[in-house]
Image (cartoon, rainbow, N blue to C red):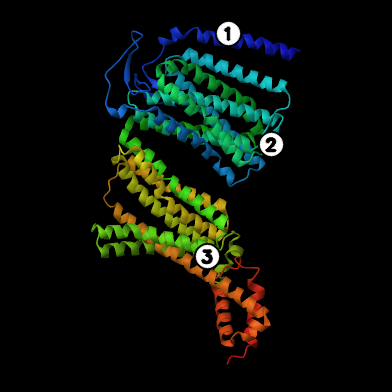
Amino acid sequence: MAPNLRLRLCYPVFFLLLGFLLNSNGELDHQVSHKVIAAPRKDVGTNVIDGTGVENAFNFENGNSAVGSRKGAGNKVSVSTVALFTLAMAAATGLGAVPFFFVELDPQWAGLCNGMAAGVMLAASFDLIQEGQEYGAGNWVVTGILAGGIFIWLCKKFLEQYGEVSMLDLKGADAAKVVLVIGIMTLHSFGEGSGVGVSFAGSKGFTQGLLVTLAIAVHNIPEGLAVSMVLASRGVSPQNAMLWSIITSLPQPIVAVPSFICADAFSKFLPFCTGFAAGCMIWMVIAEVLPDAFKEASASQVASSATLSVAFMEALSTFFQNFSHDYNAEDASGFFVSLLFGLGPLLGGIILVVFALALRLQHALLMGTACGIAFVLGAWRPIQLILSSKLGFIPILLLLAMGAAFIQVSTSGVLKMATTKKASVNDLPTLTGFPLSVHTLQSFISCGAVAIHALAEGLALGVAAPKAYGLGRHMVLPVSLHGLPRGAAVASCIFGVTDSWHGSLATAAIIGFMGPISAIGAILTGIDYSGLDHIMVIACGGLIPSFGNVVKRALSWFAYIHLTAILHQRLSDKESYAAFPASSVVTVLLTAVYISEIHIPKHGCSNLKRPFIKKLEKEISNLEIP
């Protein structure tokens, strides 16, 4: 009865704090600062645009609001725009679960993941506390922290009294902890959603709202990773981890729209809300997440992973704070378009893998597809430059040769490092202990050439995107789909040699990041377009030799499979063999032996190669050549 009595005594304290909050709205009006913080360390002005796009200027000195003049159309933001941007922002949380589609956690890594999750949650709570304090209502932040801690403690006691909790495939204590983590991260999203809505209603309108949306979208990825790590460490599947990560951010678009329409009313409650979410997370980290981490990893490992996570989150917050002050609307639009540039390769990889699995495409066909796409990518820009007379035919040939030579030298160097002079290149797996053949290694080098091509195109996009400010949604689709062939080429190349759809999608996603990284770097450094055409042609030249080697080996493999299959059928059928000309048999046999001994990696056809080659050699010795 003692635990029940203590629990009942806590209810009046909690409701007293809540009543104190509701009865003090008038006092809070005098404490609101002239700055409205819409994300971790994000400032907007005192002007507010309501849902109709009309801007109102608030005079906080007298406590009254006076309608100001309506500014240009650039500040007008529709409710649908806010809803779409915040939905995309919430969906970014699911990216945090992507690594768990490719790796499985052992116990020690599970402990480190819990440590990183603790660091992310602590960093998010620090930002929420600072955000609430910059409203000028520090007392309400403290009240919110205490209320959040009491609330989550009451929730834990309630779950314990309710009995054995089950969620997904979890039961008991693990399920209760997962419920608390998901609930806390969901509560935390309410504050971020209201902040985004208020930022779109600020004096800078769409510009400030876009910056804050980008900041929180990037901020959501490690938060989704934190939720996924807690779930994955307890055996939850990657699909469910991604789903629940996105669910924790769904309050962001739900709250953003009403907070955009009623920005002034929502700004009054933000100090308490941010403190409340911070208090919940701090309590959960100390009481549940860190103790679980210490069970699987040492204290120093957990502390290091948590510290690195906090440092990363604070660095991210500082970067976006500086960006919001130093860059204009054109740069913000360029950042947004640059991020969209990375979606195309991943989408192309997904489409290719789906078709390959559904149609059971042969590996040689996949390699040919990759080479064909790479040829188009390599030839497209040089042909454009020749037709537009921007560069002459001879300079383009020289630049292409320069790129081809660079990739050829790099490929030769890598292969020499991986093999020895006395050993056959096909014995690479046994020499290095590395699960790669030369064919696979060449495919990865070819993907590196595609990455260089993506970096070159990213530089051009980084220069062009800010200048295209005003096109808005018209640029979203073409920019997103521009990298689709690149992703298809990379995915088909990797899938053709590894037969792993996980590796194909992971490589396509990595290549997809190259373009946005390069574009954002171009925006930050402020480079111009001079010289970018030369860099692009050199990158196109690098695609030719890399994929040339791939298609050569793919053709050899294709020929070997079909020739040996035909011969196996002919030699096993005596009647067909008798009718088969001896000279043709010799030609085909010699071709198959030549291909198998020189061009085919042994791991590719081990079940067919060695015993059948011996049979072929025996048949050759017994044949009487006319």
Q: Amino acid at mark 1?
A: Leu
On the question of residue 345 being in view, the answer is yes
Q: Which residue is mark 2?
A: 169
Q: How many labels sit on residues?
A: 3
The mark closer to the camera, 3 or 1, is 3
Q: Which residue is mark 3?
A: 364
Residue 263: image quadrant is top left
Please tell me which residue is depicted at 68% across the width and 30% down the height of the picture.
175
Quadrant (top left, top right, bottom left, bottom right) of the N terminus: top right
- Measure the alpha-carbon separation of dots 3 and 1: 72 Å
Please tell me which residue is depicted at 55% across the width and 72% down the height of the picture.
422
User: Do residues under tags 1 and 2 come within 8 Å of each other at their CB atoms?
Assistant: no
Residue positioned most to the left: 389
Q: Amino acid at mark 2?
A: Asp
Please tell me which residue is depicted at 40% across the width and 51% down the height of the picture.
454
Image coordinates of residue 460 in percent, x first then y, are 32, 48
Above or below: residue 475 compared with residue 77: below
